[in-house]
Image (cartoon, rainbow, N blue to C red):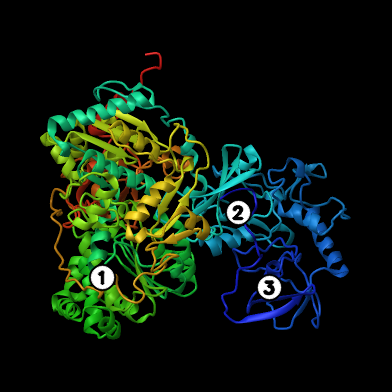
Amino acid sequence: MKDFILPDADFGTPASKSKTTVTLVIDGTSVTVPEGTSVMRASAEAGIKVPRLCATDSIEAFGSCRLCLVEIEGRRGTPASCTTPVAEGMVVHTQTGKLARLRRGVMELYISDHPLDCLTCAANGDCELQDMAGAVGLREVRYQPGENHFATRCNGEENPRYTPKDTSNPYFTYDPAKCIVCSRCVRACEEVQGTFALTIEGRGFDSRVASGAGQDFLSSDCVSCGACVQACPTATLQENAIIDMGQPDHSVVTTCAYCGVGCSFRAEMKGDTLVRMVPWKQGKANRGHSCVKGRFAYGYASHADRILNPMIRERIEDPWREVNWDEAMTFTATRLRRIQDQHGPGSIGGITSSRCTNEETYLVQKLIRQVFGNNNVDTCARVCHSPTGYGLKTTFGTSAGTQDFDSIAQTDVVIVIGANPTDGHPVFASRLKKRLRAGARLIVIDPRRIDLVRSPHVQAAHHLALTPGTNVAVLTALAHVIVTEGLADEDFIRSRCDWDGFQDWAAFVADDRHSPEATALLTGVPAAELRAAARLFATGGNGAIYYGLGVTEHSQGSTTVMAIANLAMATGNIGRPGVGVNPLRGQNNVQGACDMGSFPHELPGYRHVQDDATRAIFENLWGVTLSNEPGLRIPNMLDAAVEGTFRGLYVQGEDILQSDPNTKHVAAGLAAMDCVIVHDLFLNETANYAHVFLPGSSFLEKDGTFTNAERRINRVRRVMAPKNGYADWEVTQMLARAMGAGWHYAHPSQVMDEISATTPSFSNVSYELLEREGSVQWPCNDAAPAGTPVMHVDGFVRGKGNFVVTEYVPTDERTGPRFPLLLTTGRILSQYNVGAQTRRTENVVWHDEDVLEIHPHDAEQRGIRDGGWVRLASRSGETTLRAKITDRVAPGVVYTTFHHPDTQANVITTDYSDWATNCPEYKVTAVQISPSNGPSDWQKDYAEQAARARRILPAAE
């Protein structure tokens, strides 16, 4: 989908959802549109352009610019077409002499207070004001220069109405001199983003857009999503890239490589240089919206830190030596085969990436199974969402969420548990907030007061601020209320679920020990608040549950997912729009990494390696006999490395030293190996212990697909040539060939053809289908040739829904006199995962270090001041970081992020993990806090070791 810059069609006002149609006549043309459609949109759909400035179809009609006037037979005056709904038999005229005079007069007024520097303006060639002046035939401005907002001096004195440009935001500039006060930016901030950061200050001629009371954009509540920039019809709000480089000349539609929302963008180019990313209106996940990361934080792809040549070294103490690709592959293959000759076929393995494409992930697991000859494959997807796979497969029969994101528009009650959408999944959060402003109710279950609990025009009906680690107890208490008060949907349960299983579960949750009163002391949630939340969810209409890593990254992560599924089935909230169980995936292709067989016990499509029929499919295609023994997970690989039996590891696009728990143990395991291969964009933390570095390619430099949190398979399209010479799938293929495999893929579409031939849920997926449909949601097969937006409509994949008894089992990680506080972790809006990408963009202006949130009571007890250094210690290790005193966290709970390697928050976390999947328990760590003078000795030693490990010999050497 490569084209010259053809803007997305803009119909002026949003589409009507009415199923009743109306027929009218516009300029002699008969037009039939849904009832409630504006005259402006009806005209646009008929190919008739009505001039406009304040209207755009991403926001509601406003009717302020008076440029879109029309005449309607039988009506007096000249109504605004944007605010006038169509009516049966209406006859509209958009072009008359009277309208032409009125429109030219309106344009004269706009131009009289606007600088006429069009030739040097950054919006030249992409300015709606300029376009409308031409459309109405403006040839002169009769008004003489007088009071204005654009001249720095007026009548020889400083102009009191002139306001200088605001260049505080690193990504865009606000120039008040060019503002026409159309309010599109203000309305986009309110209606699309939901932040309400902008307003119109002043009255009449003194009206201007403001980002707060005397604040610039950077210090205001603006979240830099870009909605205001996209809505602006002039150069008032303009991307700095456009100011610096000028207008792009062609574009490619691709998919964002940050979170699991999977936003579609037009990458707008000038030659082979990326000028800007514009959210694509036809993108079914984001519907034309974006966040600061997807819209602006792509500069890492051309950052000076990128490594573009392969490098090798004999020992990790040696400096790196640049080599060509042939030498790198020969070195790598020789080492890996030598290890297997000495220690057996199971002595090496690999890790797939949730940031790489489906095709690349499929090839890595194929490399390990076909070429390495074992099942020692794991992925960061297990480290975050493997309990989702286990829990939903056990209860529903499939390992993925049930809805599409459009479903949120039909939701009446939302539970958000263990997720912070405004920071982790901001585009989905904007859609959720829009629904909440329209009347839906919200229940937040989280130890921390996230923004959704209370923010402009959004407030949760209930915030269940539970003690970290008690998710299962809270969910069981909610179920207790629903069952004992007769609120369960018996008709749904009898027809769709296993009735005997339900009765066993109902008897379990009805036990008095699970009542809100009995669990209040354990969970910290007041019984009355919990009862009210349960009643609201059971009786409030369509109920949807959205959850994140605060559910899965616990010792009872899988149990919690099953408890969520139980709650949805008990209330009948499965199988239709507006309901469902929806995991919010942390990275762009977490879902795809799971789908592609990245687990040591599962082949692509979640089929166990011990299933003979499944293995036969791949054996016949690959020409090898596959092992039926599940392989090693990452913790098992590290344990075996320390023991001396696991010696080689290929890591594609992951940084396990920073992202996995118990950093010291990870470092010990990596240091014990004979060959660690890191395949990435940058020398990340794991590369400190690597012997081979294979440079990777960014999402802008490859073709492929990502699968987002709603199971949507989206195309990733190559925007520019790989800076390292090869896309990641080609690098993996070169390694396979160096080790003797006869791979001959010429394009990722051929890999997708192999995936569809071997994986039932992908059986109808092809690049041709994706080009035609834009995207599809699996399962996509003969039963659902265009994909499946909503799962389990007529029945569960497993047949009958399976209620599972979810006994609460406390974590082994306990507080005590030495470690009396509980640490939980999460993310922040401007940064992403371990920060390797976002730390190399201007996003650091918002978050340049990890900080520790601590309640004022706990801080006062320990003599900690806001902004001061604190020592954070656990049974696993210690680090230091600055304190942020806030009541977002409850007494006894502290919180931090893990985006910066200087902090190494995971040196604190423990080896405890989910009982079913080994997903680490990041969210509950017993800690102590005390004042500190700065970085710890461990941090200093780590920084010195990292600096030594990153030495690169000059090319001549």
In front of the other: 815 or 311: 311
The residue type indicated by label 3 comes to Thr
| Amino acid, disc 2 | Gln
Residues at badges 1 and 3 in contact (C-beta under 8 Å)? Answer: no
Identify the residue shown where x is 40% and y is 56%.
708
Cα–Cα gap, marks 1 and 2 = 45 Å
> Which numbered tag is attached to residue 83?
3
Mark 1 vs 2: CB contact within 8 A: no
Q: Which residue is mark 2?
A: 230
Q: CA distance from mark 2 to mark 3?
A: 22 Å
Which of 887 and 499 lies nearest the eye of the viewer?
499
Residue hosting label 1: 798
Q: Where is residue 560, by image quadrant?
A: bottom left
Neighbor class of circle 2 (other Cα within 10 Å; few <14, some 14-19, many 20+) is: some
Q: Earlier in the sequence, mark 1 or mark 2?
A: 2
Regarding residue 675, the answer to whether it shows in the image is yes
In the rendering, at what x and y percent does residue 786 appear?
Answer: 45, 65
